[in-house]
Image: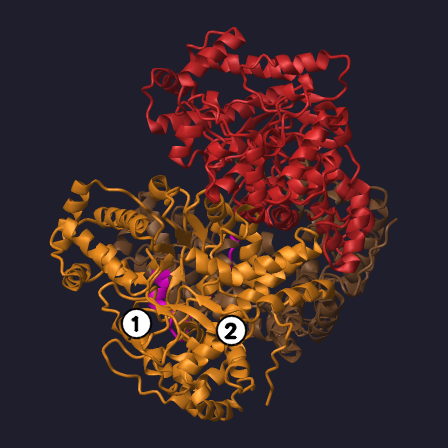
Chain colours: A orange, B red, C brown
Amino acid sequence: MTRIDLDPDRLLPAEPSQRAVARRLHQEVGNLPIVSPHGHVDPLLLLEDRPFDDPAALFITPDHYVTRMLHAHGVPLGALGVPRRDGDGSGADPREIWRLLCRHWEAFRGTPSRYWIEAQLAGVFDVPIRPSADDADQIYDRLLERFALPEYRPRALFDRFNVEVLATTDDPCSDLFVHRRLAEDPTWTGRVVPTFRADRYLDPSLDGWSTCIDELGRAAGVDTSSYSGYIEALQERRAHFKRQGATATDHGPPDAGTATLSPAQAERIFVSARGAKASGDETRAFRQHMVCEMARMSCDDGLVMQLHPGVFRNHHPQTWRDHGTDQGADIPVAIEFTRALRPLLDLYGAHPNFRMVVFTLDETTWSRELAPLAGFYPSVYIGAPWWFLDTPDALLRFREAVTDTAGFAKTSGFIDDTRAFGSIPVRHDVARRIDCAYLSRLVVEHRLAEAEAAATARDLAHRLPLEVFRL
Amino acid sequence: MTRIDLDPDRLLPAEPSQRAVARRLHQEVGNLPIVSPHGHVDPLLLLEDRPFDDPAALFITPDHYVTRMLHAHGVPLGALGVPRRDGDGSGADPREIWRLLCRHWEAFRGTPSRYWIEAQLAGVFDVPIRPSADDADQIYDRLLERFALPEYRPRALFDRFNVEVLATTDDPCSDLFVHRRLAEDPTWTGRVVPTFRADRYLDPSLDGWSTCIDELGRAAGVDTSSYSGYIEALQERRAHFKRQGATATDHGPPDAGTATLSPAQAERIFVSARGAKASGDETRAFRQHMVCEMARMSCDDGLVMQLHPGVFRNHHPQTWRDHGTDQGADIPVAIEFTRALRPLLDLYGAHPNFRMVVFTLDETTWSRELAPLAGFYPSVYIGAPWWFLDTPDALLRFREAVTDTAGFAKTSGFIDDTRAFGSIPVRHDVARRIDCAYLSRLVVEHRLAEAEAAATARDLAHRLPLEVFRL
Amino acid sequence: MTRIDLDPDRLLPAEPSQRAVARRLHQEVGNLPIVSPHGHVDPLLLLEDRPFDDPAALFITPDHYVTRMLHAHGVPLGALGVPRRDGDGSGADPREIWRLLCRHWEAFRGTPSRYWIEAQLAGVFDVPIRPSADDADQIYDRLLERFALPEYRPRALFDRFNVEVLATTDDPCSDLFVHRRLAEDPTWTGRVVPTFRADRYLDPSLDGWSTCIDELGRAAGVDTSSYSGYIEALQERRAHFKRQGATATDHGPPDAGTATLSPAQAERIFVSARGAKASGDETRAFRQHMVCEMARMSCDDGLVMQLHPGVFRNHHPQTWRDHGTDQGADIPVAIEFTRALRPLLDLYGAHPNFRMVVFTLDETTWSRELAPLAGFYPSVYIGAPWWFLDTPDALLRFREAVTDTAGFAKTSGFIDDTRAFGSIPVRHDVARRIDCAYLSRLVVEHRLAEAEAAATARDLAHRLPLEVFRL
């Protein structure tokens, strides 16, 4: 049995003088409250506050970071409990799923998933045993014991994690019932806000778009048979979200393109697309136009626009047919921002009420495009390294790439983007440690005074995400 | 009040054994004369040798690195003294402009602008106070006192900076009167040479191109109504520049494309373009053809060709309408060299008299394209990291990316590209420190003997720019 | 005379605690046998076991890493002994060639060629003298003495290098006579296997393709006038290679595109192309279709598919006309994998018998595309940094870029890809040292236990290449 030791200096640079600085900086920020402006935790988890079912359901089945890697080593997704689209449950035994992970633990060496899970086992659930085939059952049983205790229920963990605010991701048609119930619950003191994620309503090329627009009309109480009704319905739903505490919208189009259509053009394509008669060029122009429309609405209602294009979703058709979306089969593509964002920035780039936070999976744009854009346009902020780039090394490369041109104050602070509730404090701590590592280098290279570095570390961990996302 | 201390080990790596090597290497090069083969200092500054007006005029208003960042934090360019295109001065009070910078000083943490300005305050002007809202006026007043002293006039600084040669950037129609006056001044012993920057004469798609060609004809005393007259006029102006000491031409097209047209095709497009009747494809072909023509002329007259494509100029239309060009609203784009440069390199890549220095803002091309090109073609040299990439971290990434494939001797040495006269020694010192940092790693990893590293550091700082730019 | 000292800590990180870990890790792997799954050594060298001719023939003339750099400094390829395509030998004196290299030795500072050659001089041939104009003759003479000794013949070196298996690159029409003779030689105990390199048979746009298909038919004993005969002939030749020990095929198309044609489409284009009447679009579609066909055959016969697209071959027309291919005038281009590989991965990405190893010269795809693809598809492995990227710094960047998303176990282990026989142990040692350097950082940053790092280092050096390439 191998014990997991969470060294207090983990992730900090080895060189002793730099490590000493980094350690002092981390002491400034390690206990600051967590601001999570973008994630995928289901708020029902906190409303119901039921114990976690089992280790597979917490650590494996819903986490496509984990299932994709096991799939890459030949484990079928069904064997990991991932349900089939046809509605059949996988029938996989949770203990067997956990054993599969433990047997393949070596495959995760060097990955953030390994770091996050080990840090949760040792730091959150007090089961500091490194997964292995031999110890799988022992860990499983000990975790089950923990889950049964009141201090390991979701609300207790939310408190222990010291989450100041948690943003979820929500469908524009949602009545946000869970958020409302939670807000009204006298026994609940946390802050959970929704985020307006409207992709399926904005891209007429997606399957089922026209049906979505019908639903949107019903949810908004507006006739969406015309373009103007569609726009009104979107505005109404944004207002609904804002009333329930939302401060942001979230957009994941396939590319960063923005465009403007005249009202007549927009109306014409809208009607064509409602009848499934719009061409590929027309639906793309409409989708890119709607990004500008969302920006226009943000100027009015102040919701911060999050934009993270550049993923080829559902790359493996068989996986999509069998298991649907978000199964680790999303692969990044190269992306272009400079030309693509220009129509939008021409309109709103210097608007005093507009703010957009741009993330990317294409690192090459950090120094070449995003930092120069954020270093000129008051409305542009650079989001955190995200998804495949939410790793110790990529977080460091991010600071190295953008700070020169955009400084610290035009970055958004950390975004955990997680479905794995227990990983929230771990992920934020990784980001804080890496920011301290980066800052410590500036200090030892005499590029920043240590007091300035400490102030910057605090900004990045707490003040900036609150301010940038208008939380 | 916070004192700025210029630590002698600034920018050098923290690990003690490596820092010791880097420090010894820097001692070899720290006092070498400055060779500045590419910059934007107005030679009138040195001809007139008047005291600097005020800190805003020296550090802020003309420096788009600084104004863009303040703009990114919501400060209008007009408030920074940036004149309007319609000719109205901004009327901003220099002291107020300086206060704006000082109030936003935190936004510059981690950026090269902060480093350059603090190093100038402490190292050039002996006002070693970190800018802040509280100390803005004190710094301002002390700087004014310095500016009034003879030892802070431009010529005295030129001497103190130990500038061996400074290249300016000049319009082909310029009579180079200031350069000539300066050369003839018996009280002036420095060397300032012009550079032939012909973009606006080579790209028929630019506004006013045809008028420029008329002016070119007048300047050259050649009838430019025909293509052959146009070519002759360009050759004549190059000869004029060369007589005044120029050793290089400078080219900043939107892409790296090169192409060849037959004389008949070139003549036909030239005539169409003169009548504003050429298509976009034609003007692009003509522009790319003219890059090859410039290379052909370089084979004849030996002027070194500098090529730095890949910037989307004037990205923000409003800023361009209000304040014109070079206001920080230029954003890089991805660029391709391998296919684009092939027509030119097919013709002149191995020509014994041709030399081109290629810079880029797209780091991805360093290891992928530029180093392999410079590692094969005798005519190709890799220019320095430039503009957004002229930073401690990017300078280091540059060496890490290109040395493997192109070594040191196919790089051009440092290019400061600055409009900020006082920053020249600071920028060159940064480049020297980072080169020493890189070389020190090769030494401690036993990849280079320290004596070789010292010789290489001297080459990079002094010998190579003189040789590569034929100074 | 400067002595070359091979420091035992060379290439290891300078920080003492990290270096200590890296040194211990390297002690685990430094003496493991060499597995070389992809290279360009001529097996005749080992069959004949003749002494090496001279230093120029061993170190310079056939090594385009070396000749390209000398060419970049103005040395004509003919002066380096590179034969002309018209059949004329260059007539260059080997000693003069060697002197040219020594005179230009400074140009190689910081490059892997310098490291490899110095490590061979000191570590393989016991002539530990740094090349220089002064010492050129002395080194030359001492090397000649060594070459005459039996312990410096190819077979003795093969044993000393501890090569467990060496894969060569071979034409599908080859009878593999040399491989067979070697396998049958009772005095030879090494393992040398062929690799099926079929590019010229798969791309109808290449000069001479149709003639190649005739030859393919003769070699296979199959009528290749029809598409089905062509396919059958390829299958037969793969089987022939497999019988002779091959475990892999090798593919270097200009792009990563894959596509599927119907049998009727394929037949139609095949016939057109045989008559030189196929369009550019058709030959490209056919080439991309043939990548899928090769993958289909791999599902059947189990040969591992190596795919390394993205080089603009023969970039300099004059060099190609004078000296032919592989002369250092190949320049990388940006490449796209996500969309390009999808048709192939849709068909075979999860096939239990299919395996593809993808290399690239475009680093930007490591974190963005290759690691995500290998981190999902069981069939995809990431090949080693290759060619221009086979350097200490790029090997390190490779691990930093891919480990986060793909771990270690979805990488292929090192690929030396060399034509320079003496460099094999040096190149593998560089890769092992850099892997240890990377792993040592994970250890000192508490991201991996040292025992795990040691096991991983052994996997990367030995177990993984054997397994991934099915050796």
Quadrant position of the C terminus of chain A in the picture: bottom left
Residue C134 in percent (x, y) is at 86, 42
Q: Is residue C108 magenta?
A: no
Q: Which mark is residue A391?
A: none
At x 26%, y 69%, the residue is A176
User: Is disc 2 in the same subunit as disc 1?
Assistant: yes
Q: Position of residue A393 (x, y in %)?
A: 56, 63
Question: Which quadrant of the figure has residue C45?
Answer: bottom right
Pointer 2 chain:
A
Residue at numbered disc 2: A426
**Discs 2/1, front:** 1
Q: Amino acid at mark 1?
A: His
Q: Work out whether residue B270 or residue C4 is closer to the camera in this orientation and state it.
A: B270
> Residue lying furthest right in this view?
C1
| On screen, residue B408 above or below B181 | below
SS state under label 2: helix
Q: Is residue B176 left or right of residue A163?
A: right
Q: Is C173 located above or below residue C354 in the figure? A: above
In magenta, the rendered stretch is: C342-362
Determine whether the residue tagged by mark 1 lies in a helix, strand or loop: helix
Q: Chain of mark 1?
A: A
Q: Quadrant of the N terminus of chain A?
A: bottom right
Residues at marks 2 and 1, CA–CA distance in whole angstroms:
25 Å
Q: Position of residue A409 (x, y in %)?
A: 52, 52
Examine the rendering and report whether any part of residue B92 can be seen: yes
According to the picture, the residue beneath numbered tag 1 turns out to be A179
Q: How many numbered callouts?
A: 2
Find out whether residue C357 is within the magenta segment: yes
In the displayed structure, B165 sits above or below C228; it is above
Closer to the camera in the image, B331 or A277: B331
Residue A77: x %, y % from top left: 36, 78
Of the two numbered discs 2 and 1 on the same chain, state the one appearing first in sequence.
1
